[in-house]
Image (tube, rainbow, N blue to C red):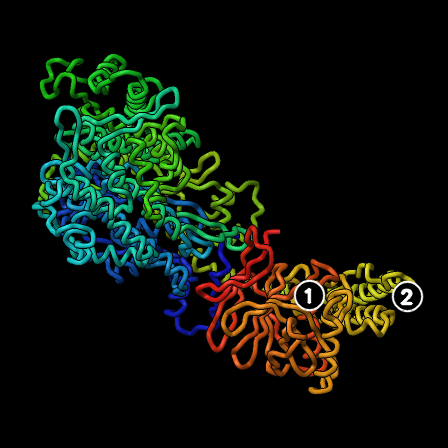
Amino acid sequence: MDFQLEATVHLGDFQDQTEVRKILRSHDFAVTTLDRNKRLQTGMAELEGLEFGKSDFVLLDEVSMEQFMENLKLRFEKGRIYTYIGEVVVSVNPYRQMDMYGKDSIEAYRGRELYENPPHLYAVSDAAYKAMKRRAKDTCIVISGESGAGKTEASKYIMQYIAAITNPSQRAEVESVKNVLLKSNCVLEAFGNAKTNRNDNSSRFGKYMDINFNFNGDPTGGHINNYLLEKSRVVQQQEGERNFHSFYQLLRGSSDEILESLHLQNDPALYACTKEGAATSTSNNDRSSHRAVMNALQVIGFSKEEINSIYQILASILLLGNVQFESDGESVQILQLEAVNHISDLTATDPESISKSLLYRTVATGGGEVIEKGHTEQDACFGRDAFAKALYERLFGWIVGRINSVIEVKNYNPVLHGKNTVIGVLDIYGFEIFDNNSFEQFCINYCNEKLQQLFIELILRQEQDEYQREGITWQEIDYFNNQIIVDLVEQPHKGIISILDEACLTAGKVTDMVCLDSMDTKLAQHPHYTSRKLCPTDKTMDFKKHFRIRHYAGDVTYSVEGFLDKNKDLLFQDFKRLMYNSANPVLKEMWPDGQLSITEVTKRPLTAATLFKNSIVALVDKLACKEPYYVRCIKPNEMKSPVLFDDARCQHQVAYLGLLENVMVRRAGFAYRQPYARFLQRYKMTCEYTWPNHLMASDREAVEAIITQHGFQDDVAYGQTKLFVRTPRSLFTLEQERAALIPILVLFLQKIWRGAIARMRCRRMRAIYAIMGCYKRYKVKAHFWEVERRFANVRTMPDYGKSVEWPTPPAALAQFHNNTVMLHRRWWARQIVKNIPPSDMLDVRAKVAALTALSGERKDWGASRAWERDYLANVRDCPQTSSSFSRISKELRNKDEYSQVLFSGFCRKVNRFNKSTDRGLLVTDKYVYKLEPKKQYKVLKRLPLDAFTGLSVTSGVDQMVVLHTSSQDDVLLCLQQGELCPNQDRVGELVGVLVDYFTRIRRVHFPVKVCCSAVQLQMRGKPKSVTIETRVGQSNVDFKKSRDGFILLVPKN
């Protein structure tokens, strides 16, 4: 069924018919009231009266240029700027604000058929949107016309309309996408548009925007393609024209503080790049436009740093344009070194590197040698201008890419989210004929030839071919096919682009004049090409300078000067490396090719003309696979007057746009065609003989039954595979009747299907629960059986089953499994502990405490050896002093009544004078003693064990320990080995006995901190830091005072 379930309307819930209409229209249905006793009579809605002329050129009494122009002029004078040719909208630039784009207008066209309302951009926008949403078909709106005809404004109104009719539920993520799509226009206009002599807001680049929609018809993202930015405008403008808007907005809209930070002043006349347009009047307000652009950049998601970088690059270009050179005959110098310093500051580069790049060119010889070649004054100026143009072009490309990164469709899964459909909007430069036409106009006019070819292909030729293929009676209509002009430009080996590329690749000095001679030789016989050499009597062209192409829009004379340089698009590698090495990450990102070294061999880049040709071919291919809707813009006069209609000027545009031929094809043809199967699928519910399925011999017979029931026999023709409907009125009637029936059918189908689903779900759930119960019981038993099998003989195993792998439990037994594993571990531990002699249990407990406290952060802590604890009393460790220590130990035991020695040993300790000395350390269950070994272990200091709050050690192999005290006077020492084993680690032993004692006996937590770098402590209330340093030639471990505390010097080995 060709309908959407989200279009459901429960009619029984609503008493108010108006409410029902609103719901239906919100789901993209046209709404009408059916009279069941009478066949639906539908006509076009009330349009304009006859005093406004014909709203559709197809309705003209006679198809002639005179009548076409008379109707176009009448509608323009009456303020009716839009007229149809079938589904094509002809738009005349009114050169004034029109009160026809507000919310009321949007609501009037929303969800309506094309001919229900007077002609409007909103009507064709809605038609493209409905085709995309109803038939899940990609569509595009192609806006064409010459410069100043109103293409940019038309694209903005189309975007405004699409944004207004989508996302009725106001979902935040969709609103965000819409805002970015709308705001991107403002940004791209500022950086890509400029005032020309023909248009105050002329697009100096081509833009094609794809808007992605989800299955619900809401925008989910988009993508912008830009084509051939006119970067030569950055350094040179024709008289009366301006540079790009962005420069004037920066100078006139920024605050004094910002301009000062950018080393600029607010007068455009001070800068070579903006001097020409400084005094030129324009309808744009640069100050308010600058505020709008700043707001748009923030809404899109540009960071503050990125926005600053954008305007720093603009300022750099302005200052770069003011850099002048002078030559003394041998070398070239820069006159404005202060400007170079400012550019260096703005681009985060070295001023010497900028000067060097402007004055010299680094060249790699064949042998790999790198030399610096000084510029002539002319070369330096060329390099400066090329650098400025490249900076702006890279900036513009980066801005477009940054916008694309924000609006691109993210995390889209067709399985989860449905089909992703697209509406494309093409706003590209119009046909241009200037007094001086250069390489840019050549590319622009070639682009318009390709778009005209697409229009001919889709609207004129394919339409006639289809009628012939389907066997429809048809009178052939003649039209001019501009394929011959397209081939003149792009044909391989013979076209102008191929000749230009060949000249660019030729070794030696090849000039523009040599290239022109080559074109004259190869294209001499072409009917659409001429030059002064081929036509010596034509004095409108100069020898060795001009050639002329007979375009579909008229003859254009091109000046060949600069063609080769612009086609090569040469930029010295020094500038690329300079920008790549910038400390500004945004600028660095724009110049990825700057990372190549001067000696690195790279593939020769494609020329500017070839790159542009490839992009335009890709664009045409992209448009050709979508269902096109056309807006043909016409410029009424050259004076930008809202009342003047230049008949000759307009007639010329009508002729080259092929509008008259379009009218002829539409008038003689059919507005709608559809394969029989698809037509039947969509409208079979409107006929009792075809619903729900027909019993006729073929789909064609079923379609005939639908047409006959509605009385449309005189308005259709039957082809081999398709039905052709002549007027939209018949289709509109079918759509209205279908829209009224759909909710009723949806309700019926929902009722049947929901019941079936509920019954299936109930049966399935019962079966699922039965299977789940049996399976769960089986899994539980199987798990018990497997555990029993694996652990049957663990009592007799050497490791009591520690190496046995546990089976993975079912989810229901996860907690039970964890408890069982814990029980086995406890039983295993009990078996191990039972075999440990009672005399070793004290060591085991201490080692477990050390293992827990050190948490694996200290690799070697003496776990594998026996812990002696009382090393000072050990004869093997201290053979000479053990007896005297034992005597002192007994005396202290009797005196202080402690019950056991936890640890004793020699250490290197830092005293209160920050000096390090050898001492003895005795730790008992009541006190910690500092002893003097040289004086028969005289007690130097005694601290209660309760005074210690924790200790810190390092993660290395050193023996440093910090005992933290509650009085913030910590004890810093380094344990020393005796003679028992010279490389014993005793830190772990001290940690273990203290943590075990505090935890097990006193039942208090004793924190241990393992430090990877410096150890922090307090000495007499002051913070200190101890670091470890390995030193060559150091014989013994010792402490050394440092600025922050102490350094423990450790021998190299």
Relative to 852, is 711 on the left or the right? left
Q: Position of residue 364 (x, y in %)?
A: 35, 25
Q: Position of residue 295 (x, y in %)?
A: 26, 59
In this orientation, does residue 79 appear?
no
How many other residues sit within 10 Å of disc 2, few (<14), some (14-19) or many (≥20)?
A: few
Q: Disc 1 on helix, strand or loop?
A: loop
Q: Position of residue 219 (x, y in %)?
A: 40, 55
What residue type is disc 2 on? Answer: Arg
> Residue 259, which numbered label?
none
* Residue at the spot of label 2: 795
What residue type is disc 1 on? Answer: Arg
With respect to residue 781, does 343 lie above or below? above
Is 457 or 413 nearer to us in this picture? 413
Question: Nearer the viewer's eye, disc 2 or disc 1?
Answer: 1
With respect to residue 403, does 383 lie above or below? above
> Residue 986, which numbered label?
1
Residue at figure coordinates x 25%, y 14% from the top left: 518
Relative to 843, is 445 on the left or the right? left
Quadrant assignment, res 589 = top left
Q: Position of residue 871 (x, y in %)?
A: 73, 69
How many other residues sit within 10 Å of disc 1, few (<14), some (14-19) or many (≥20)?
A: many
Q: Disc 2 on helix, strand or loop?
A: helix
